[in-house]
Amino acid sequence: MKHVLFVLLAILSAIPVIADKAPMVDKLGLNVTDAYLRTMPPGQRVTAGFLTISNNGNEDCQILSATSPFSERIEFHQHLHANGMMQMRPLAQVLVTAGKTVKFSPGGLHLMFFDVTKPLVENEILPMRLLTDYCGTYLVNLQIRNLLQRPMMEH
Ligand SMILES: [Cu+2]
């Protein structure tokens, strides 16, 4: 009987440990700011998006994918300079280390939106979902900005 009681107490005392872990999820939160999408030149159906992701938690987060109702496919791209040429390399995922900020910006890391299904009107807001490994799913509002004065290579 004493043994059974001990096991029971062990189980009961384990419950607060599990409950303690629940608030940890909040600390894994990512903060997404300055999210925007560039307008497309006439006749194009591909564009680029940018944002800033801060990891305020104490666990690293991998951004696994991005989805949006207005694009068939979204990829993460990195610009590379190789042999004097500008190249883009797709990334399978993007790591946001604990305590660090990753900035997607023209000429660097960016999101590529393929087969955009609607006209992009300056200042409109379009939704996008970011999926991570252990850090949750984020709904991001992209503001459409006119960056057409920039050369396309800098997207
Ligand atoms: Cu690209």
Image (cartoon, helix red, strand yellow):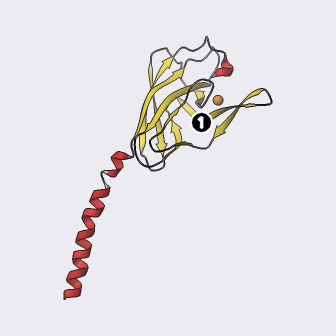
x and y, in percent, of residue 140 in the image? 43, 32
Tell me if mark 1 has few (under 14), some (14-19) or many (20+) residues whose alpha carbon lies within 10 angstroms of its own: many
Residue in the foreground of this view, choosing between 106 and 47: 106
Residue in the foreground of this view, choosing between 84 and 152: 84
x and y, in percent, of residue 67 in the image? 51, 37
x and y, in percent, of residue 50 in the image? 53, 27
**Quadrant holding ligand 1?**
top right
x and y, in percent, of residue 46 in the image? 62, 25
Seen at 23% across and 81% down, the residue is: 6
- Residue at far front of view: 99
- In the visual, does 152 lie left or right of 67? right
- Residue at far top of view: 149
Q: Considering the image in quadrants, where does the N terminus appear?
A: bottom left
Q: Does the residue labelled 1 lie within 8 Å of ligand 1?
A: no
Q: Is residue 9 above or below residue 20?
A: below
Seen at 34% across and 51% down, the residue is: 24
- In the visual, does 67 lie left or right of 43? left
Seen at 49% across and 19% down, the residue is: 144
Quadrant hosting residue 57:
top left
Which residue corresponds to mark 1?
A: 76
- Residue at far right of view: 83
Q: Is mark 1 on a helix, strand or loop?
A: strand
Q: Considering the image in quadrants, where does the C terminus appear?
A: top right
Seen at 77% across and 27% down, the residue is: 85
Number of marks in the rendered image: 1
Residue type, mark 1 in image: Phe
Quadrant hosting residue 146:
top right
